[in-house]
Structures are given as C-alpha cells and as structure tokens.
Amino acid sequence: MTSRRRFLAAGAALAASPLVAADDIPWTRLREGRLVLLMRHGATEAGLGDPAGYRLEDCRTQRNLSDAGRTEARHVGERLREARVPIAKVYTSPWCRCRETAQLAFGMAEDWEPLSSFFDFPEREAEYTRAVLKRIAGYVRHPAGGNVVMVTHNVNIAALTKHSVGTATLVPVRPDGCCSARPMQPFTL
C-alpha cells in the first residue's frame, strides 16, 4: 500500500483513534523526562500533500501553517511550559510547516532528514523509520536531561506508532533500548 493510500485510510481511522482526555495526560511522567514526544505539525492551509514542484528551500512553494496552526503550536509550547515539562532537544522535519511549529512551540529546533515526510516518496519510509527508531532507542542508553521532541508528519508518526493523529497532537514514546518504541496514548493540549 502506498503512503498516499495509507494516509487516506488512516484519516478515516483518525476519528476512531482515542485521545487521552485532558485530565488523563500523564503530566507526572512527562515531567520526569526521558521520553520522546512525537508531534505532528500544526494545522495547515487547505490541501493534501504539497503543491506540484514544491522545494524544501522555498516555503512559498509548500503547504504551510494556517493561522489556526500557528495558534496550536504556541498553545502546545505554553501548556508544556506551564506544566513544567522539561524539553532537552527538539528535532524537526525540514518542511516549513514543521520548522515553524517547532519554533513557535519550543523556540528551538534542529532539522533532521529522517523526520521528512515520505508522503510523496514511499520508498523512503523504511529507511526513515529505522533511523528514527534507532535514535529513540539511543535515549535509553544516553538519556537527555528532559524530553526530546520530534516534530514531523502524520505519515511518519503512523509508521512509527500505528497511530494516525490530528494536527499538533503529541505521542509520547518510551524508548525500549532495542529496535522499537512503545507509544503511549496520543494527546492534544
């Protein structure tokens, strides 16, 4: 199944994918750190995928955050700061919508290619997923002082966790030190 078809099928399942209620967010566990928080970028301008001929180095050619997406990103950052959730490092897909989400939410981010969308490049799915899982597993052996955030795309999160998530949704992942990650329940703030 191609990434595009999987994305469309996952979208249908999204409504059925339960999110943690606000009262059930694992704040204590998040404050302890040593989790990886996979985050989908904020809401975008209307569309599916990027326009034909888009270029990563030119945000004007991509589907970017909407005003609602910018508000979502700021809200996530504010809520995590209010809850005293430590963020040690932020990685982002080099797509402009992810970079902007990361900057608005956390004020920092480092581009990392394996977080790139493979929506138009399904042949990259296995390679990118392996690289992300390897980095997540590494945090068991070398725990950061806080949580690590990875801002990416729904197709990437679905490949990693089997969860299809809405915009600005977080999926906490517990590194297992091997070759997989144990996702906790996704939540929005």
Image: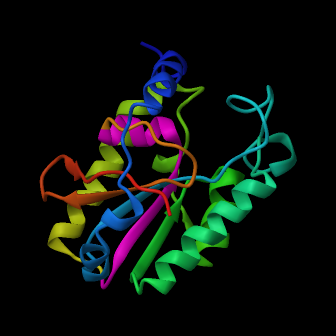
Please name whichever residue, 79 or 137, is drawn nearer the observer in this view of the structure: 79
Q: Position of residue 127 (x, y in %)?
A: 37, 37
Q: In which quadrant will I find the N terminus?
A: top left
For the point 75% across and 30% down, the residue is: 47
For the point 51% across and 15% down, the residue is: 5
Q: Is residue 179 above or below residue 87?
A: above
Number of numbered labels in the structure image: 0
Q: Is residue 189 above or below residue 98?
A: below
Q: Position of residue 25 (x, y in %)?
A: 34, 65
Q: Is residue 43 above or below residue 70?
A: above
Q: Indicate yes or no whether the magenta region holds residue 150.
A: yes
The segment highlighted magenta reads 145-161
Q: Position of residue 103 (x, y in %)?
A: 65, 71
Please name whichever residue, 127 or 167, is drawn nearer the observer in this view of the structure: 167
Q: Indicate yes or no whether the magenta region holds residue 8.
A: no
Q: Residue furthest right?
A: 60
| Res. 109 visible in picture | no
Q: How is the image coloured?
A: rainbow
Please name whichever residue, 117 or 36, is drawn nearer the observer in this view of the structure: 36
- Quadrant in the rendering for residue 116: top right
For the point 74% across and 55% down, the residue is: 68
